[in-house]
Amino acid sequence: MYFSQQNRIFAVNQNNRNMAQFINPFSDWGFKHIFGREISKDLLICFLNDLFAGEFVIKSLAFGNKEQIGLSKDSREVIFDIYCTTDEGKEIIVEMQNRGQEHFIDRALYYTSRVIVNQGIKGEWDYNIRPVYTICFMNFVDPLLPLGKLRTDMILADKDNGKMVSDKIRMVYLMLPFFEKTETECENDFERWIFVLKNMNTFERMPFLAKNAVFKKLAEISDLRTLSKKDMDKYEDSIRIMRDAYATYKYAIKTGLEDGRKQGLEEGMAQGMAQGMEKGMAQGMEKGMAQGMEKGMAQGMEKGMEKGKAEAERQKNIEFAKLMLSDGDSTEKIQRYTGLTAEEINEIAQSLH
């Protein structure tokens, strides 16, 4: 369901690509062009203030080095999309992730922790950590986050009462596929931002120009017609990379489904054969016992009848032998007519006296 939802979103974006007037913010170059430059710093400040409305106000910020070198030569290097520090010392990471990635939730936690670790200084230090916030734009659905919810804020809090223990670490996940409001349904500037960013490359005109002047500047910064040839080439390369990545992702999903069906069929057949053999053996034994009993009874009855017939025939021969003995016939003659042995005839003769 979630893959088909992302597929629909991407298809809409691609179908409107030719008529688009504004940059696609889901491309790596496009996102940094809008939010990651000195000339567009006001856009980032306005967005962050709308994101954290009622909590604090950012008056200014400074972009920092997006490349975080490890503490040792064996440590992994980290490169952020956008990294900045506010006038109050809060350090903010902003990431745009266009497709699903395994352990993405953990990745955001690692990025946040990495910045905190890099605050450590040699010598005397009292662990006075500056707050670090990571904001993740997610153009996909992560099943580890609450489904159906646009925004999820993760903080350090008490498990039982939910009360915040520290404000030094915070991850904000924005799952854009769950934002389904129309232009007229947006109630505040934060929702207007999400609506614009989600649909911007399909607009022929920028909405909300009368609501907030920031959207007028956003329209100017992101207008494709104002890009230089050099910037347009970079943008087109970024779009191509995004398309290729999506095609690879889609192919992997399709291949995985086909392989899963094939493996499931093979395992199902193997399991079915094993169960069938086991059941067949059990049924065979049961059937064999029944058949054996039936056959044994038949054979026993037949054998008993044969034995009875033989005994009856023997009794008849004994009675016939008695008659022949009474007539004075010889033992040899009686043997020839009855099939009895000489010993049996002698016993019969003695029984007559």
Image (cartoon, helix red, strand yellow):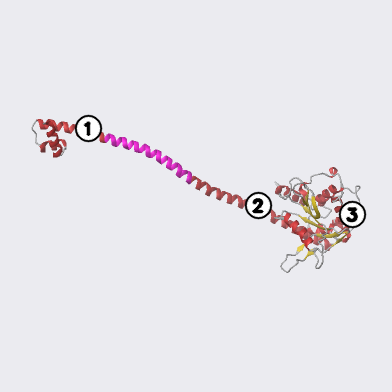
- Is 255 rendered above or below residue 180? below
Q: Amino acid at mark 1?
A: Ala
Q: What is the C-alpha distance between the residues marked 3 and 1?
A: 121 Å
Query: If you read the primary sequence from the N terminus, does the residue marked by circle 3 or circle 1 appear first?
Result: 3
Can you give x and y, in whole percent of width and height, for residue 49 in the image? Answer: 87, 52
Kindly identify the residue that appears in the image at 86 percent across and 46 percent down. 188
Number of labels in the image equals 3
Q: Amino acid at mark 3?
A: Lys
Residue 254's label in the rendered image is 2
Q: Amino acid at mark 2?
A: Lys
Extent of the magenta region: 277-306
Residue 226 among magenta residues: no
Disc 3: which residue: 217
Given this view, does label 3 or label 1 mark the residue nearer the observer? Answer: 1
| Element type at mark 1 | helix
Q: Residue 26 or 290: which is nearer the viewer?
A: 290
Q: What is the C-alpha distance between the residues marked 3 and 2?
A: 41 Å
Judged by its main secondary structure, the magenta piece is helix
Residue 185's label in the rendered image is none
How would you rate the neighbour count of disc 3 (Cα within 10 Å): few for under 14, some for 14-19, many for 20 or more?
A: some
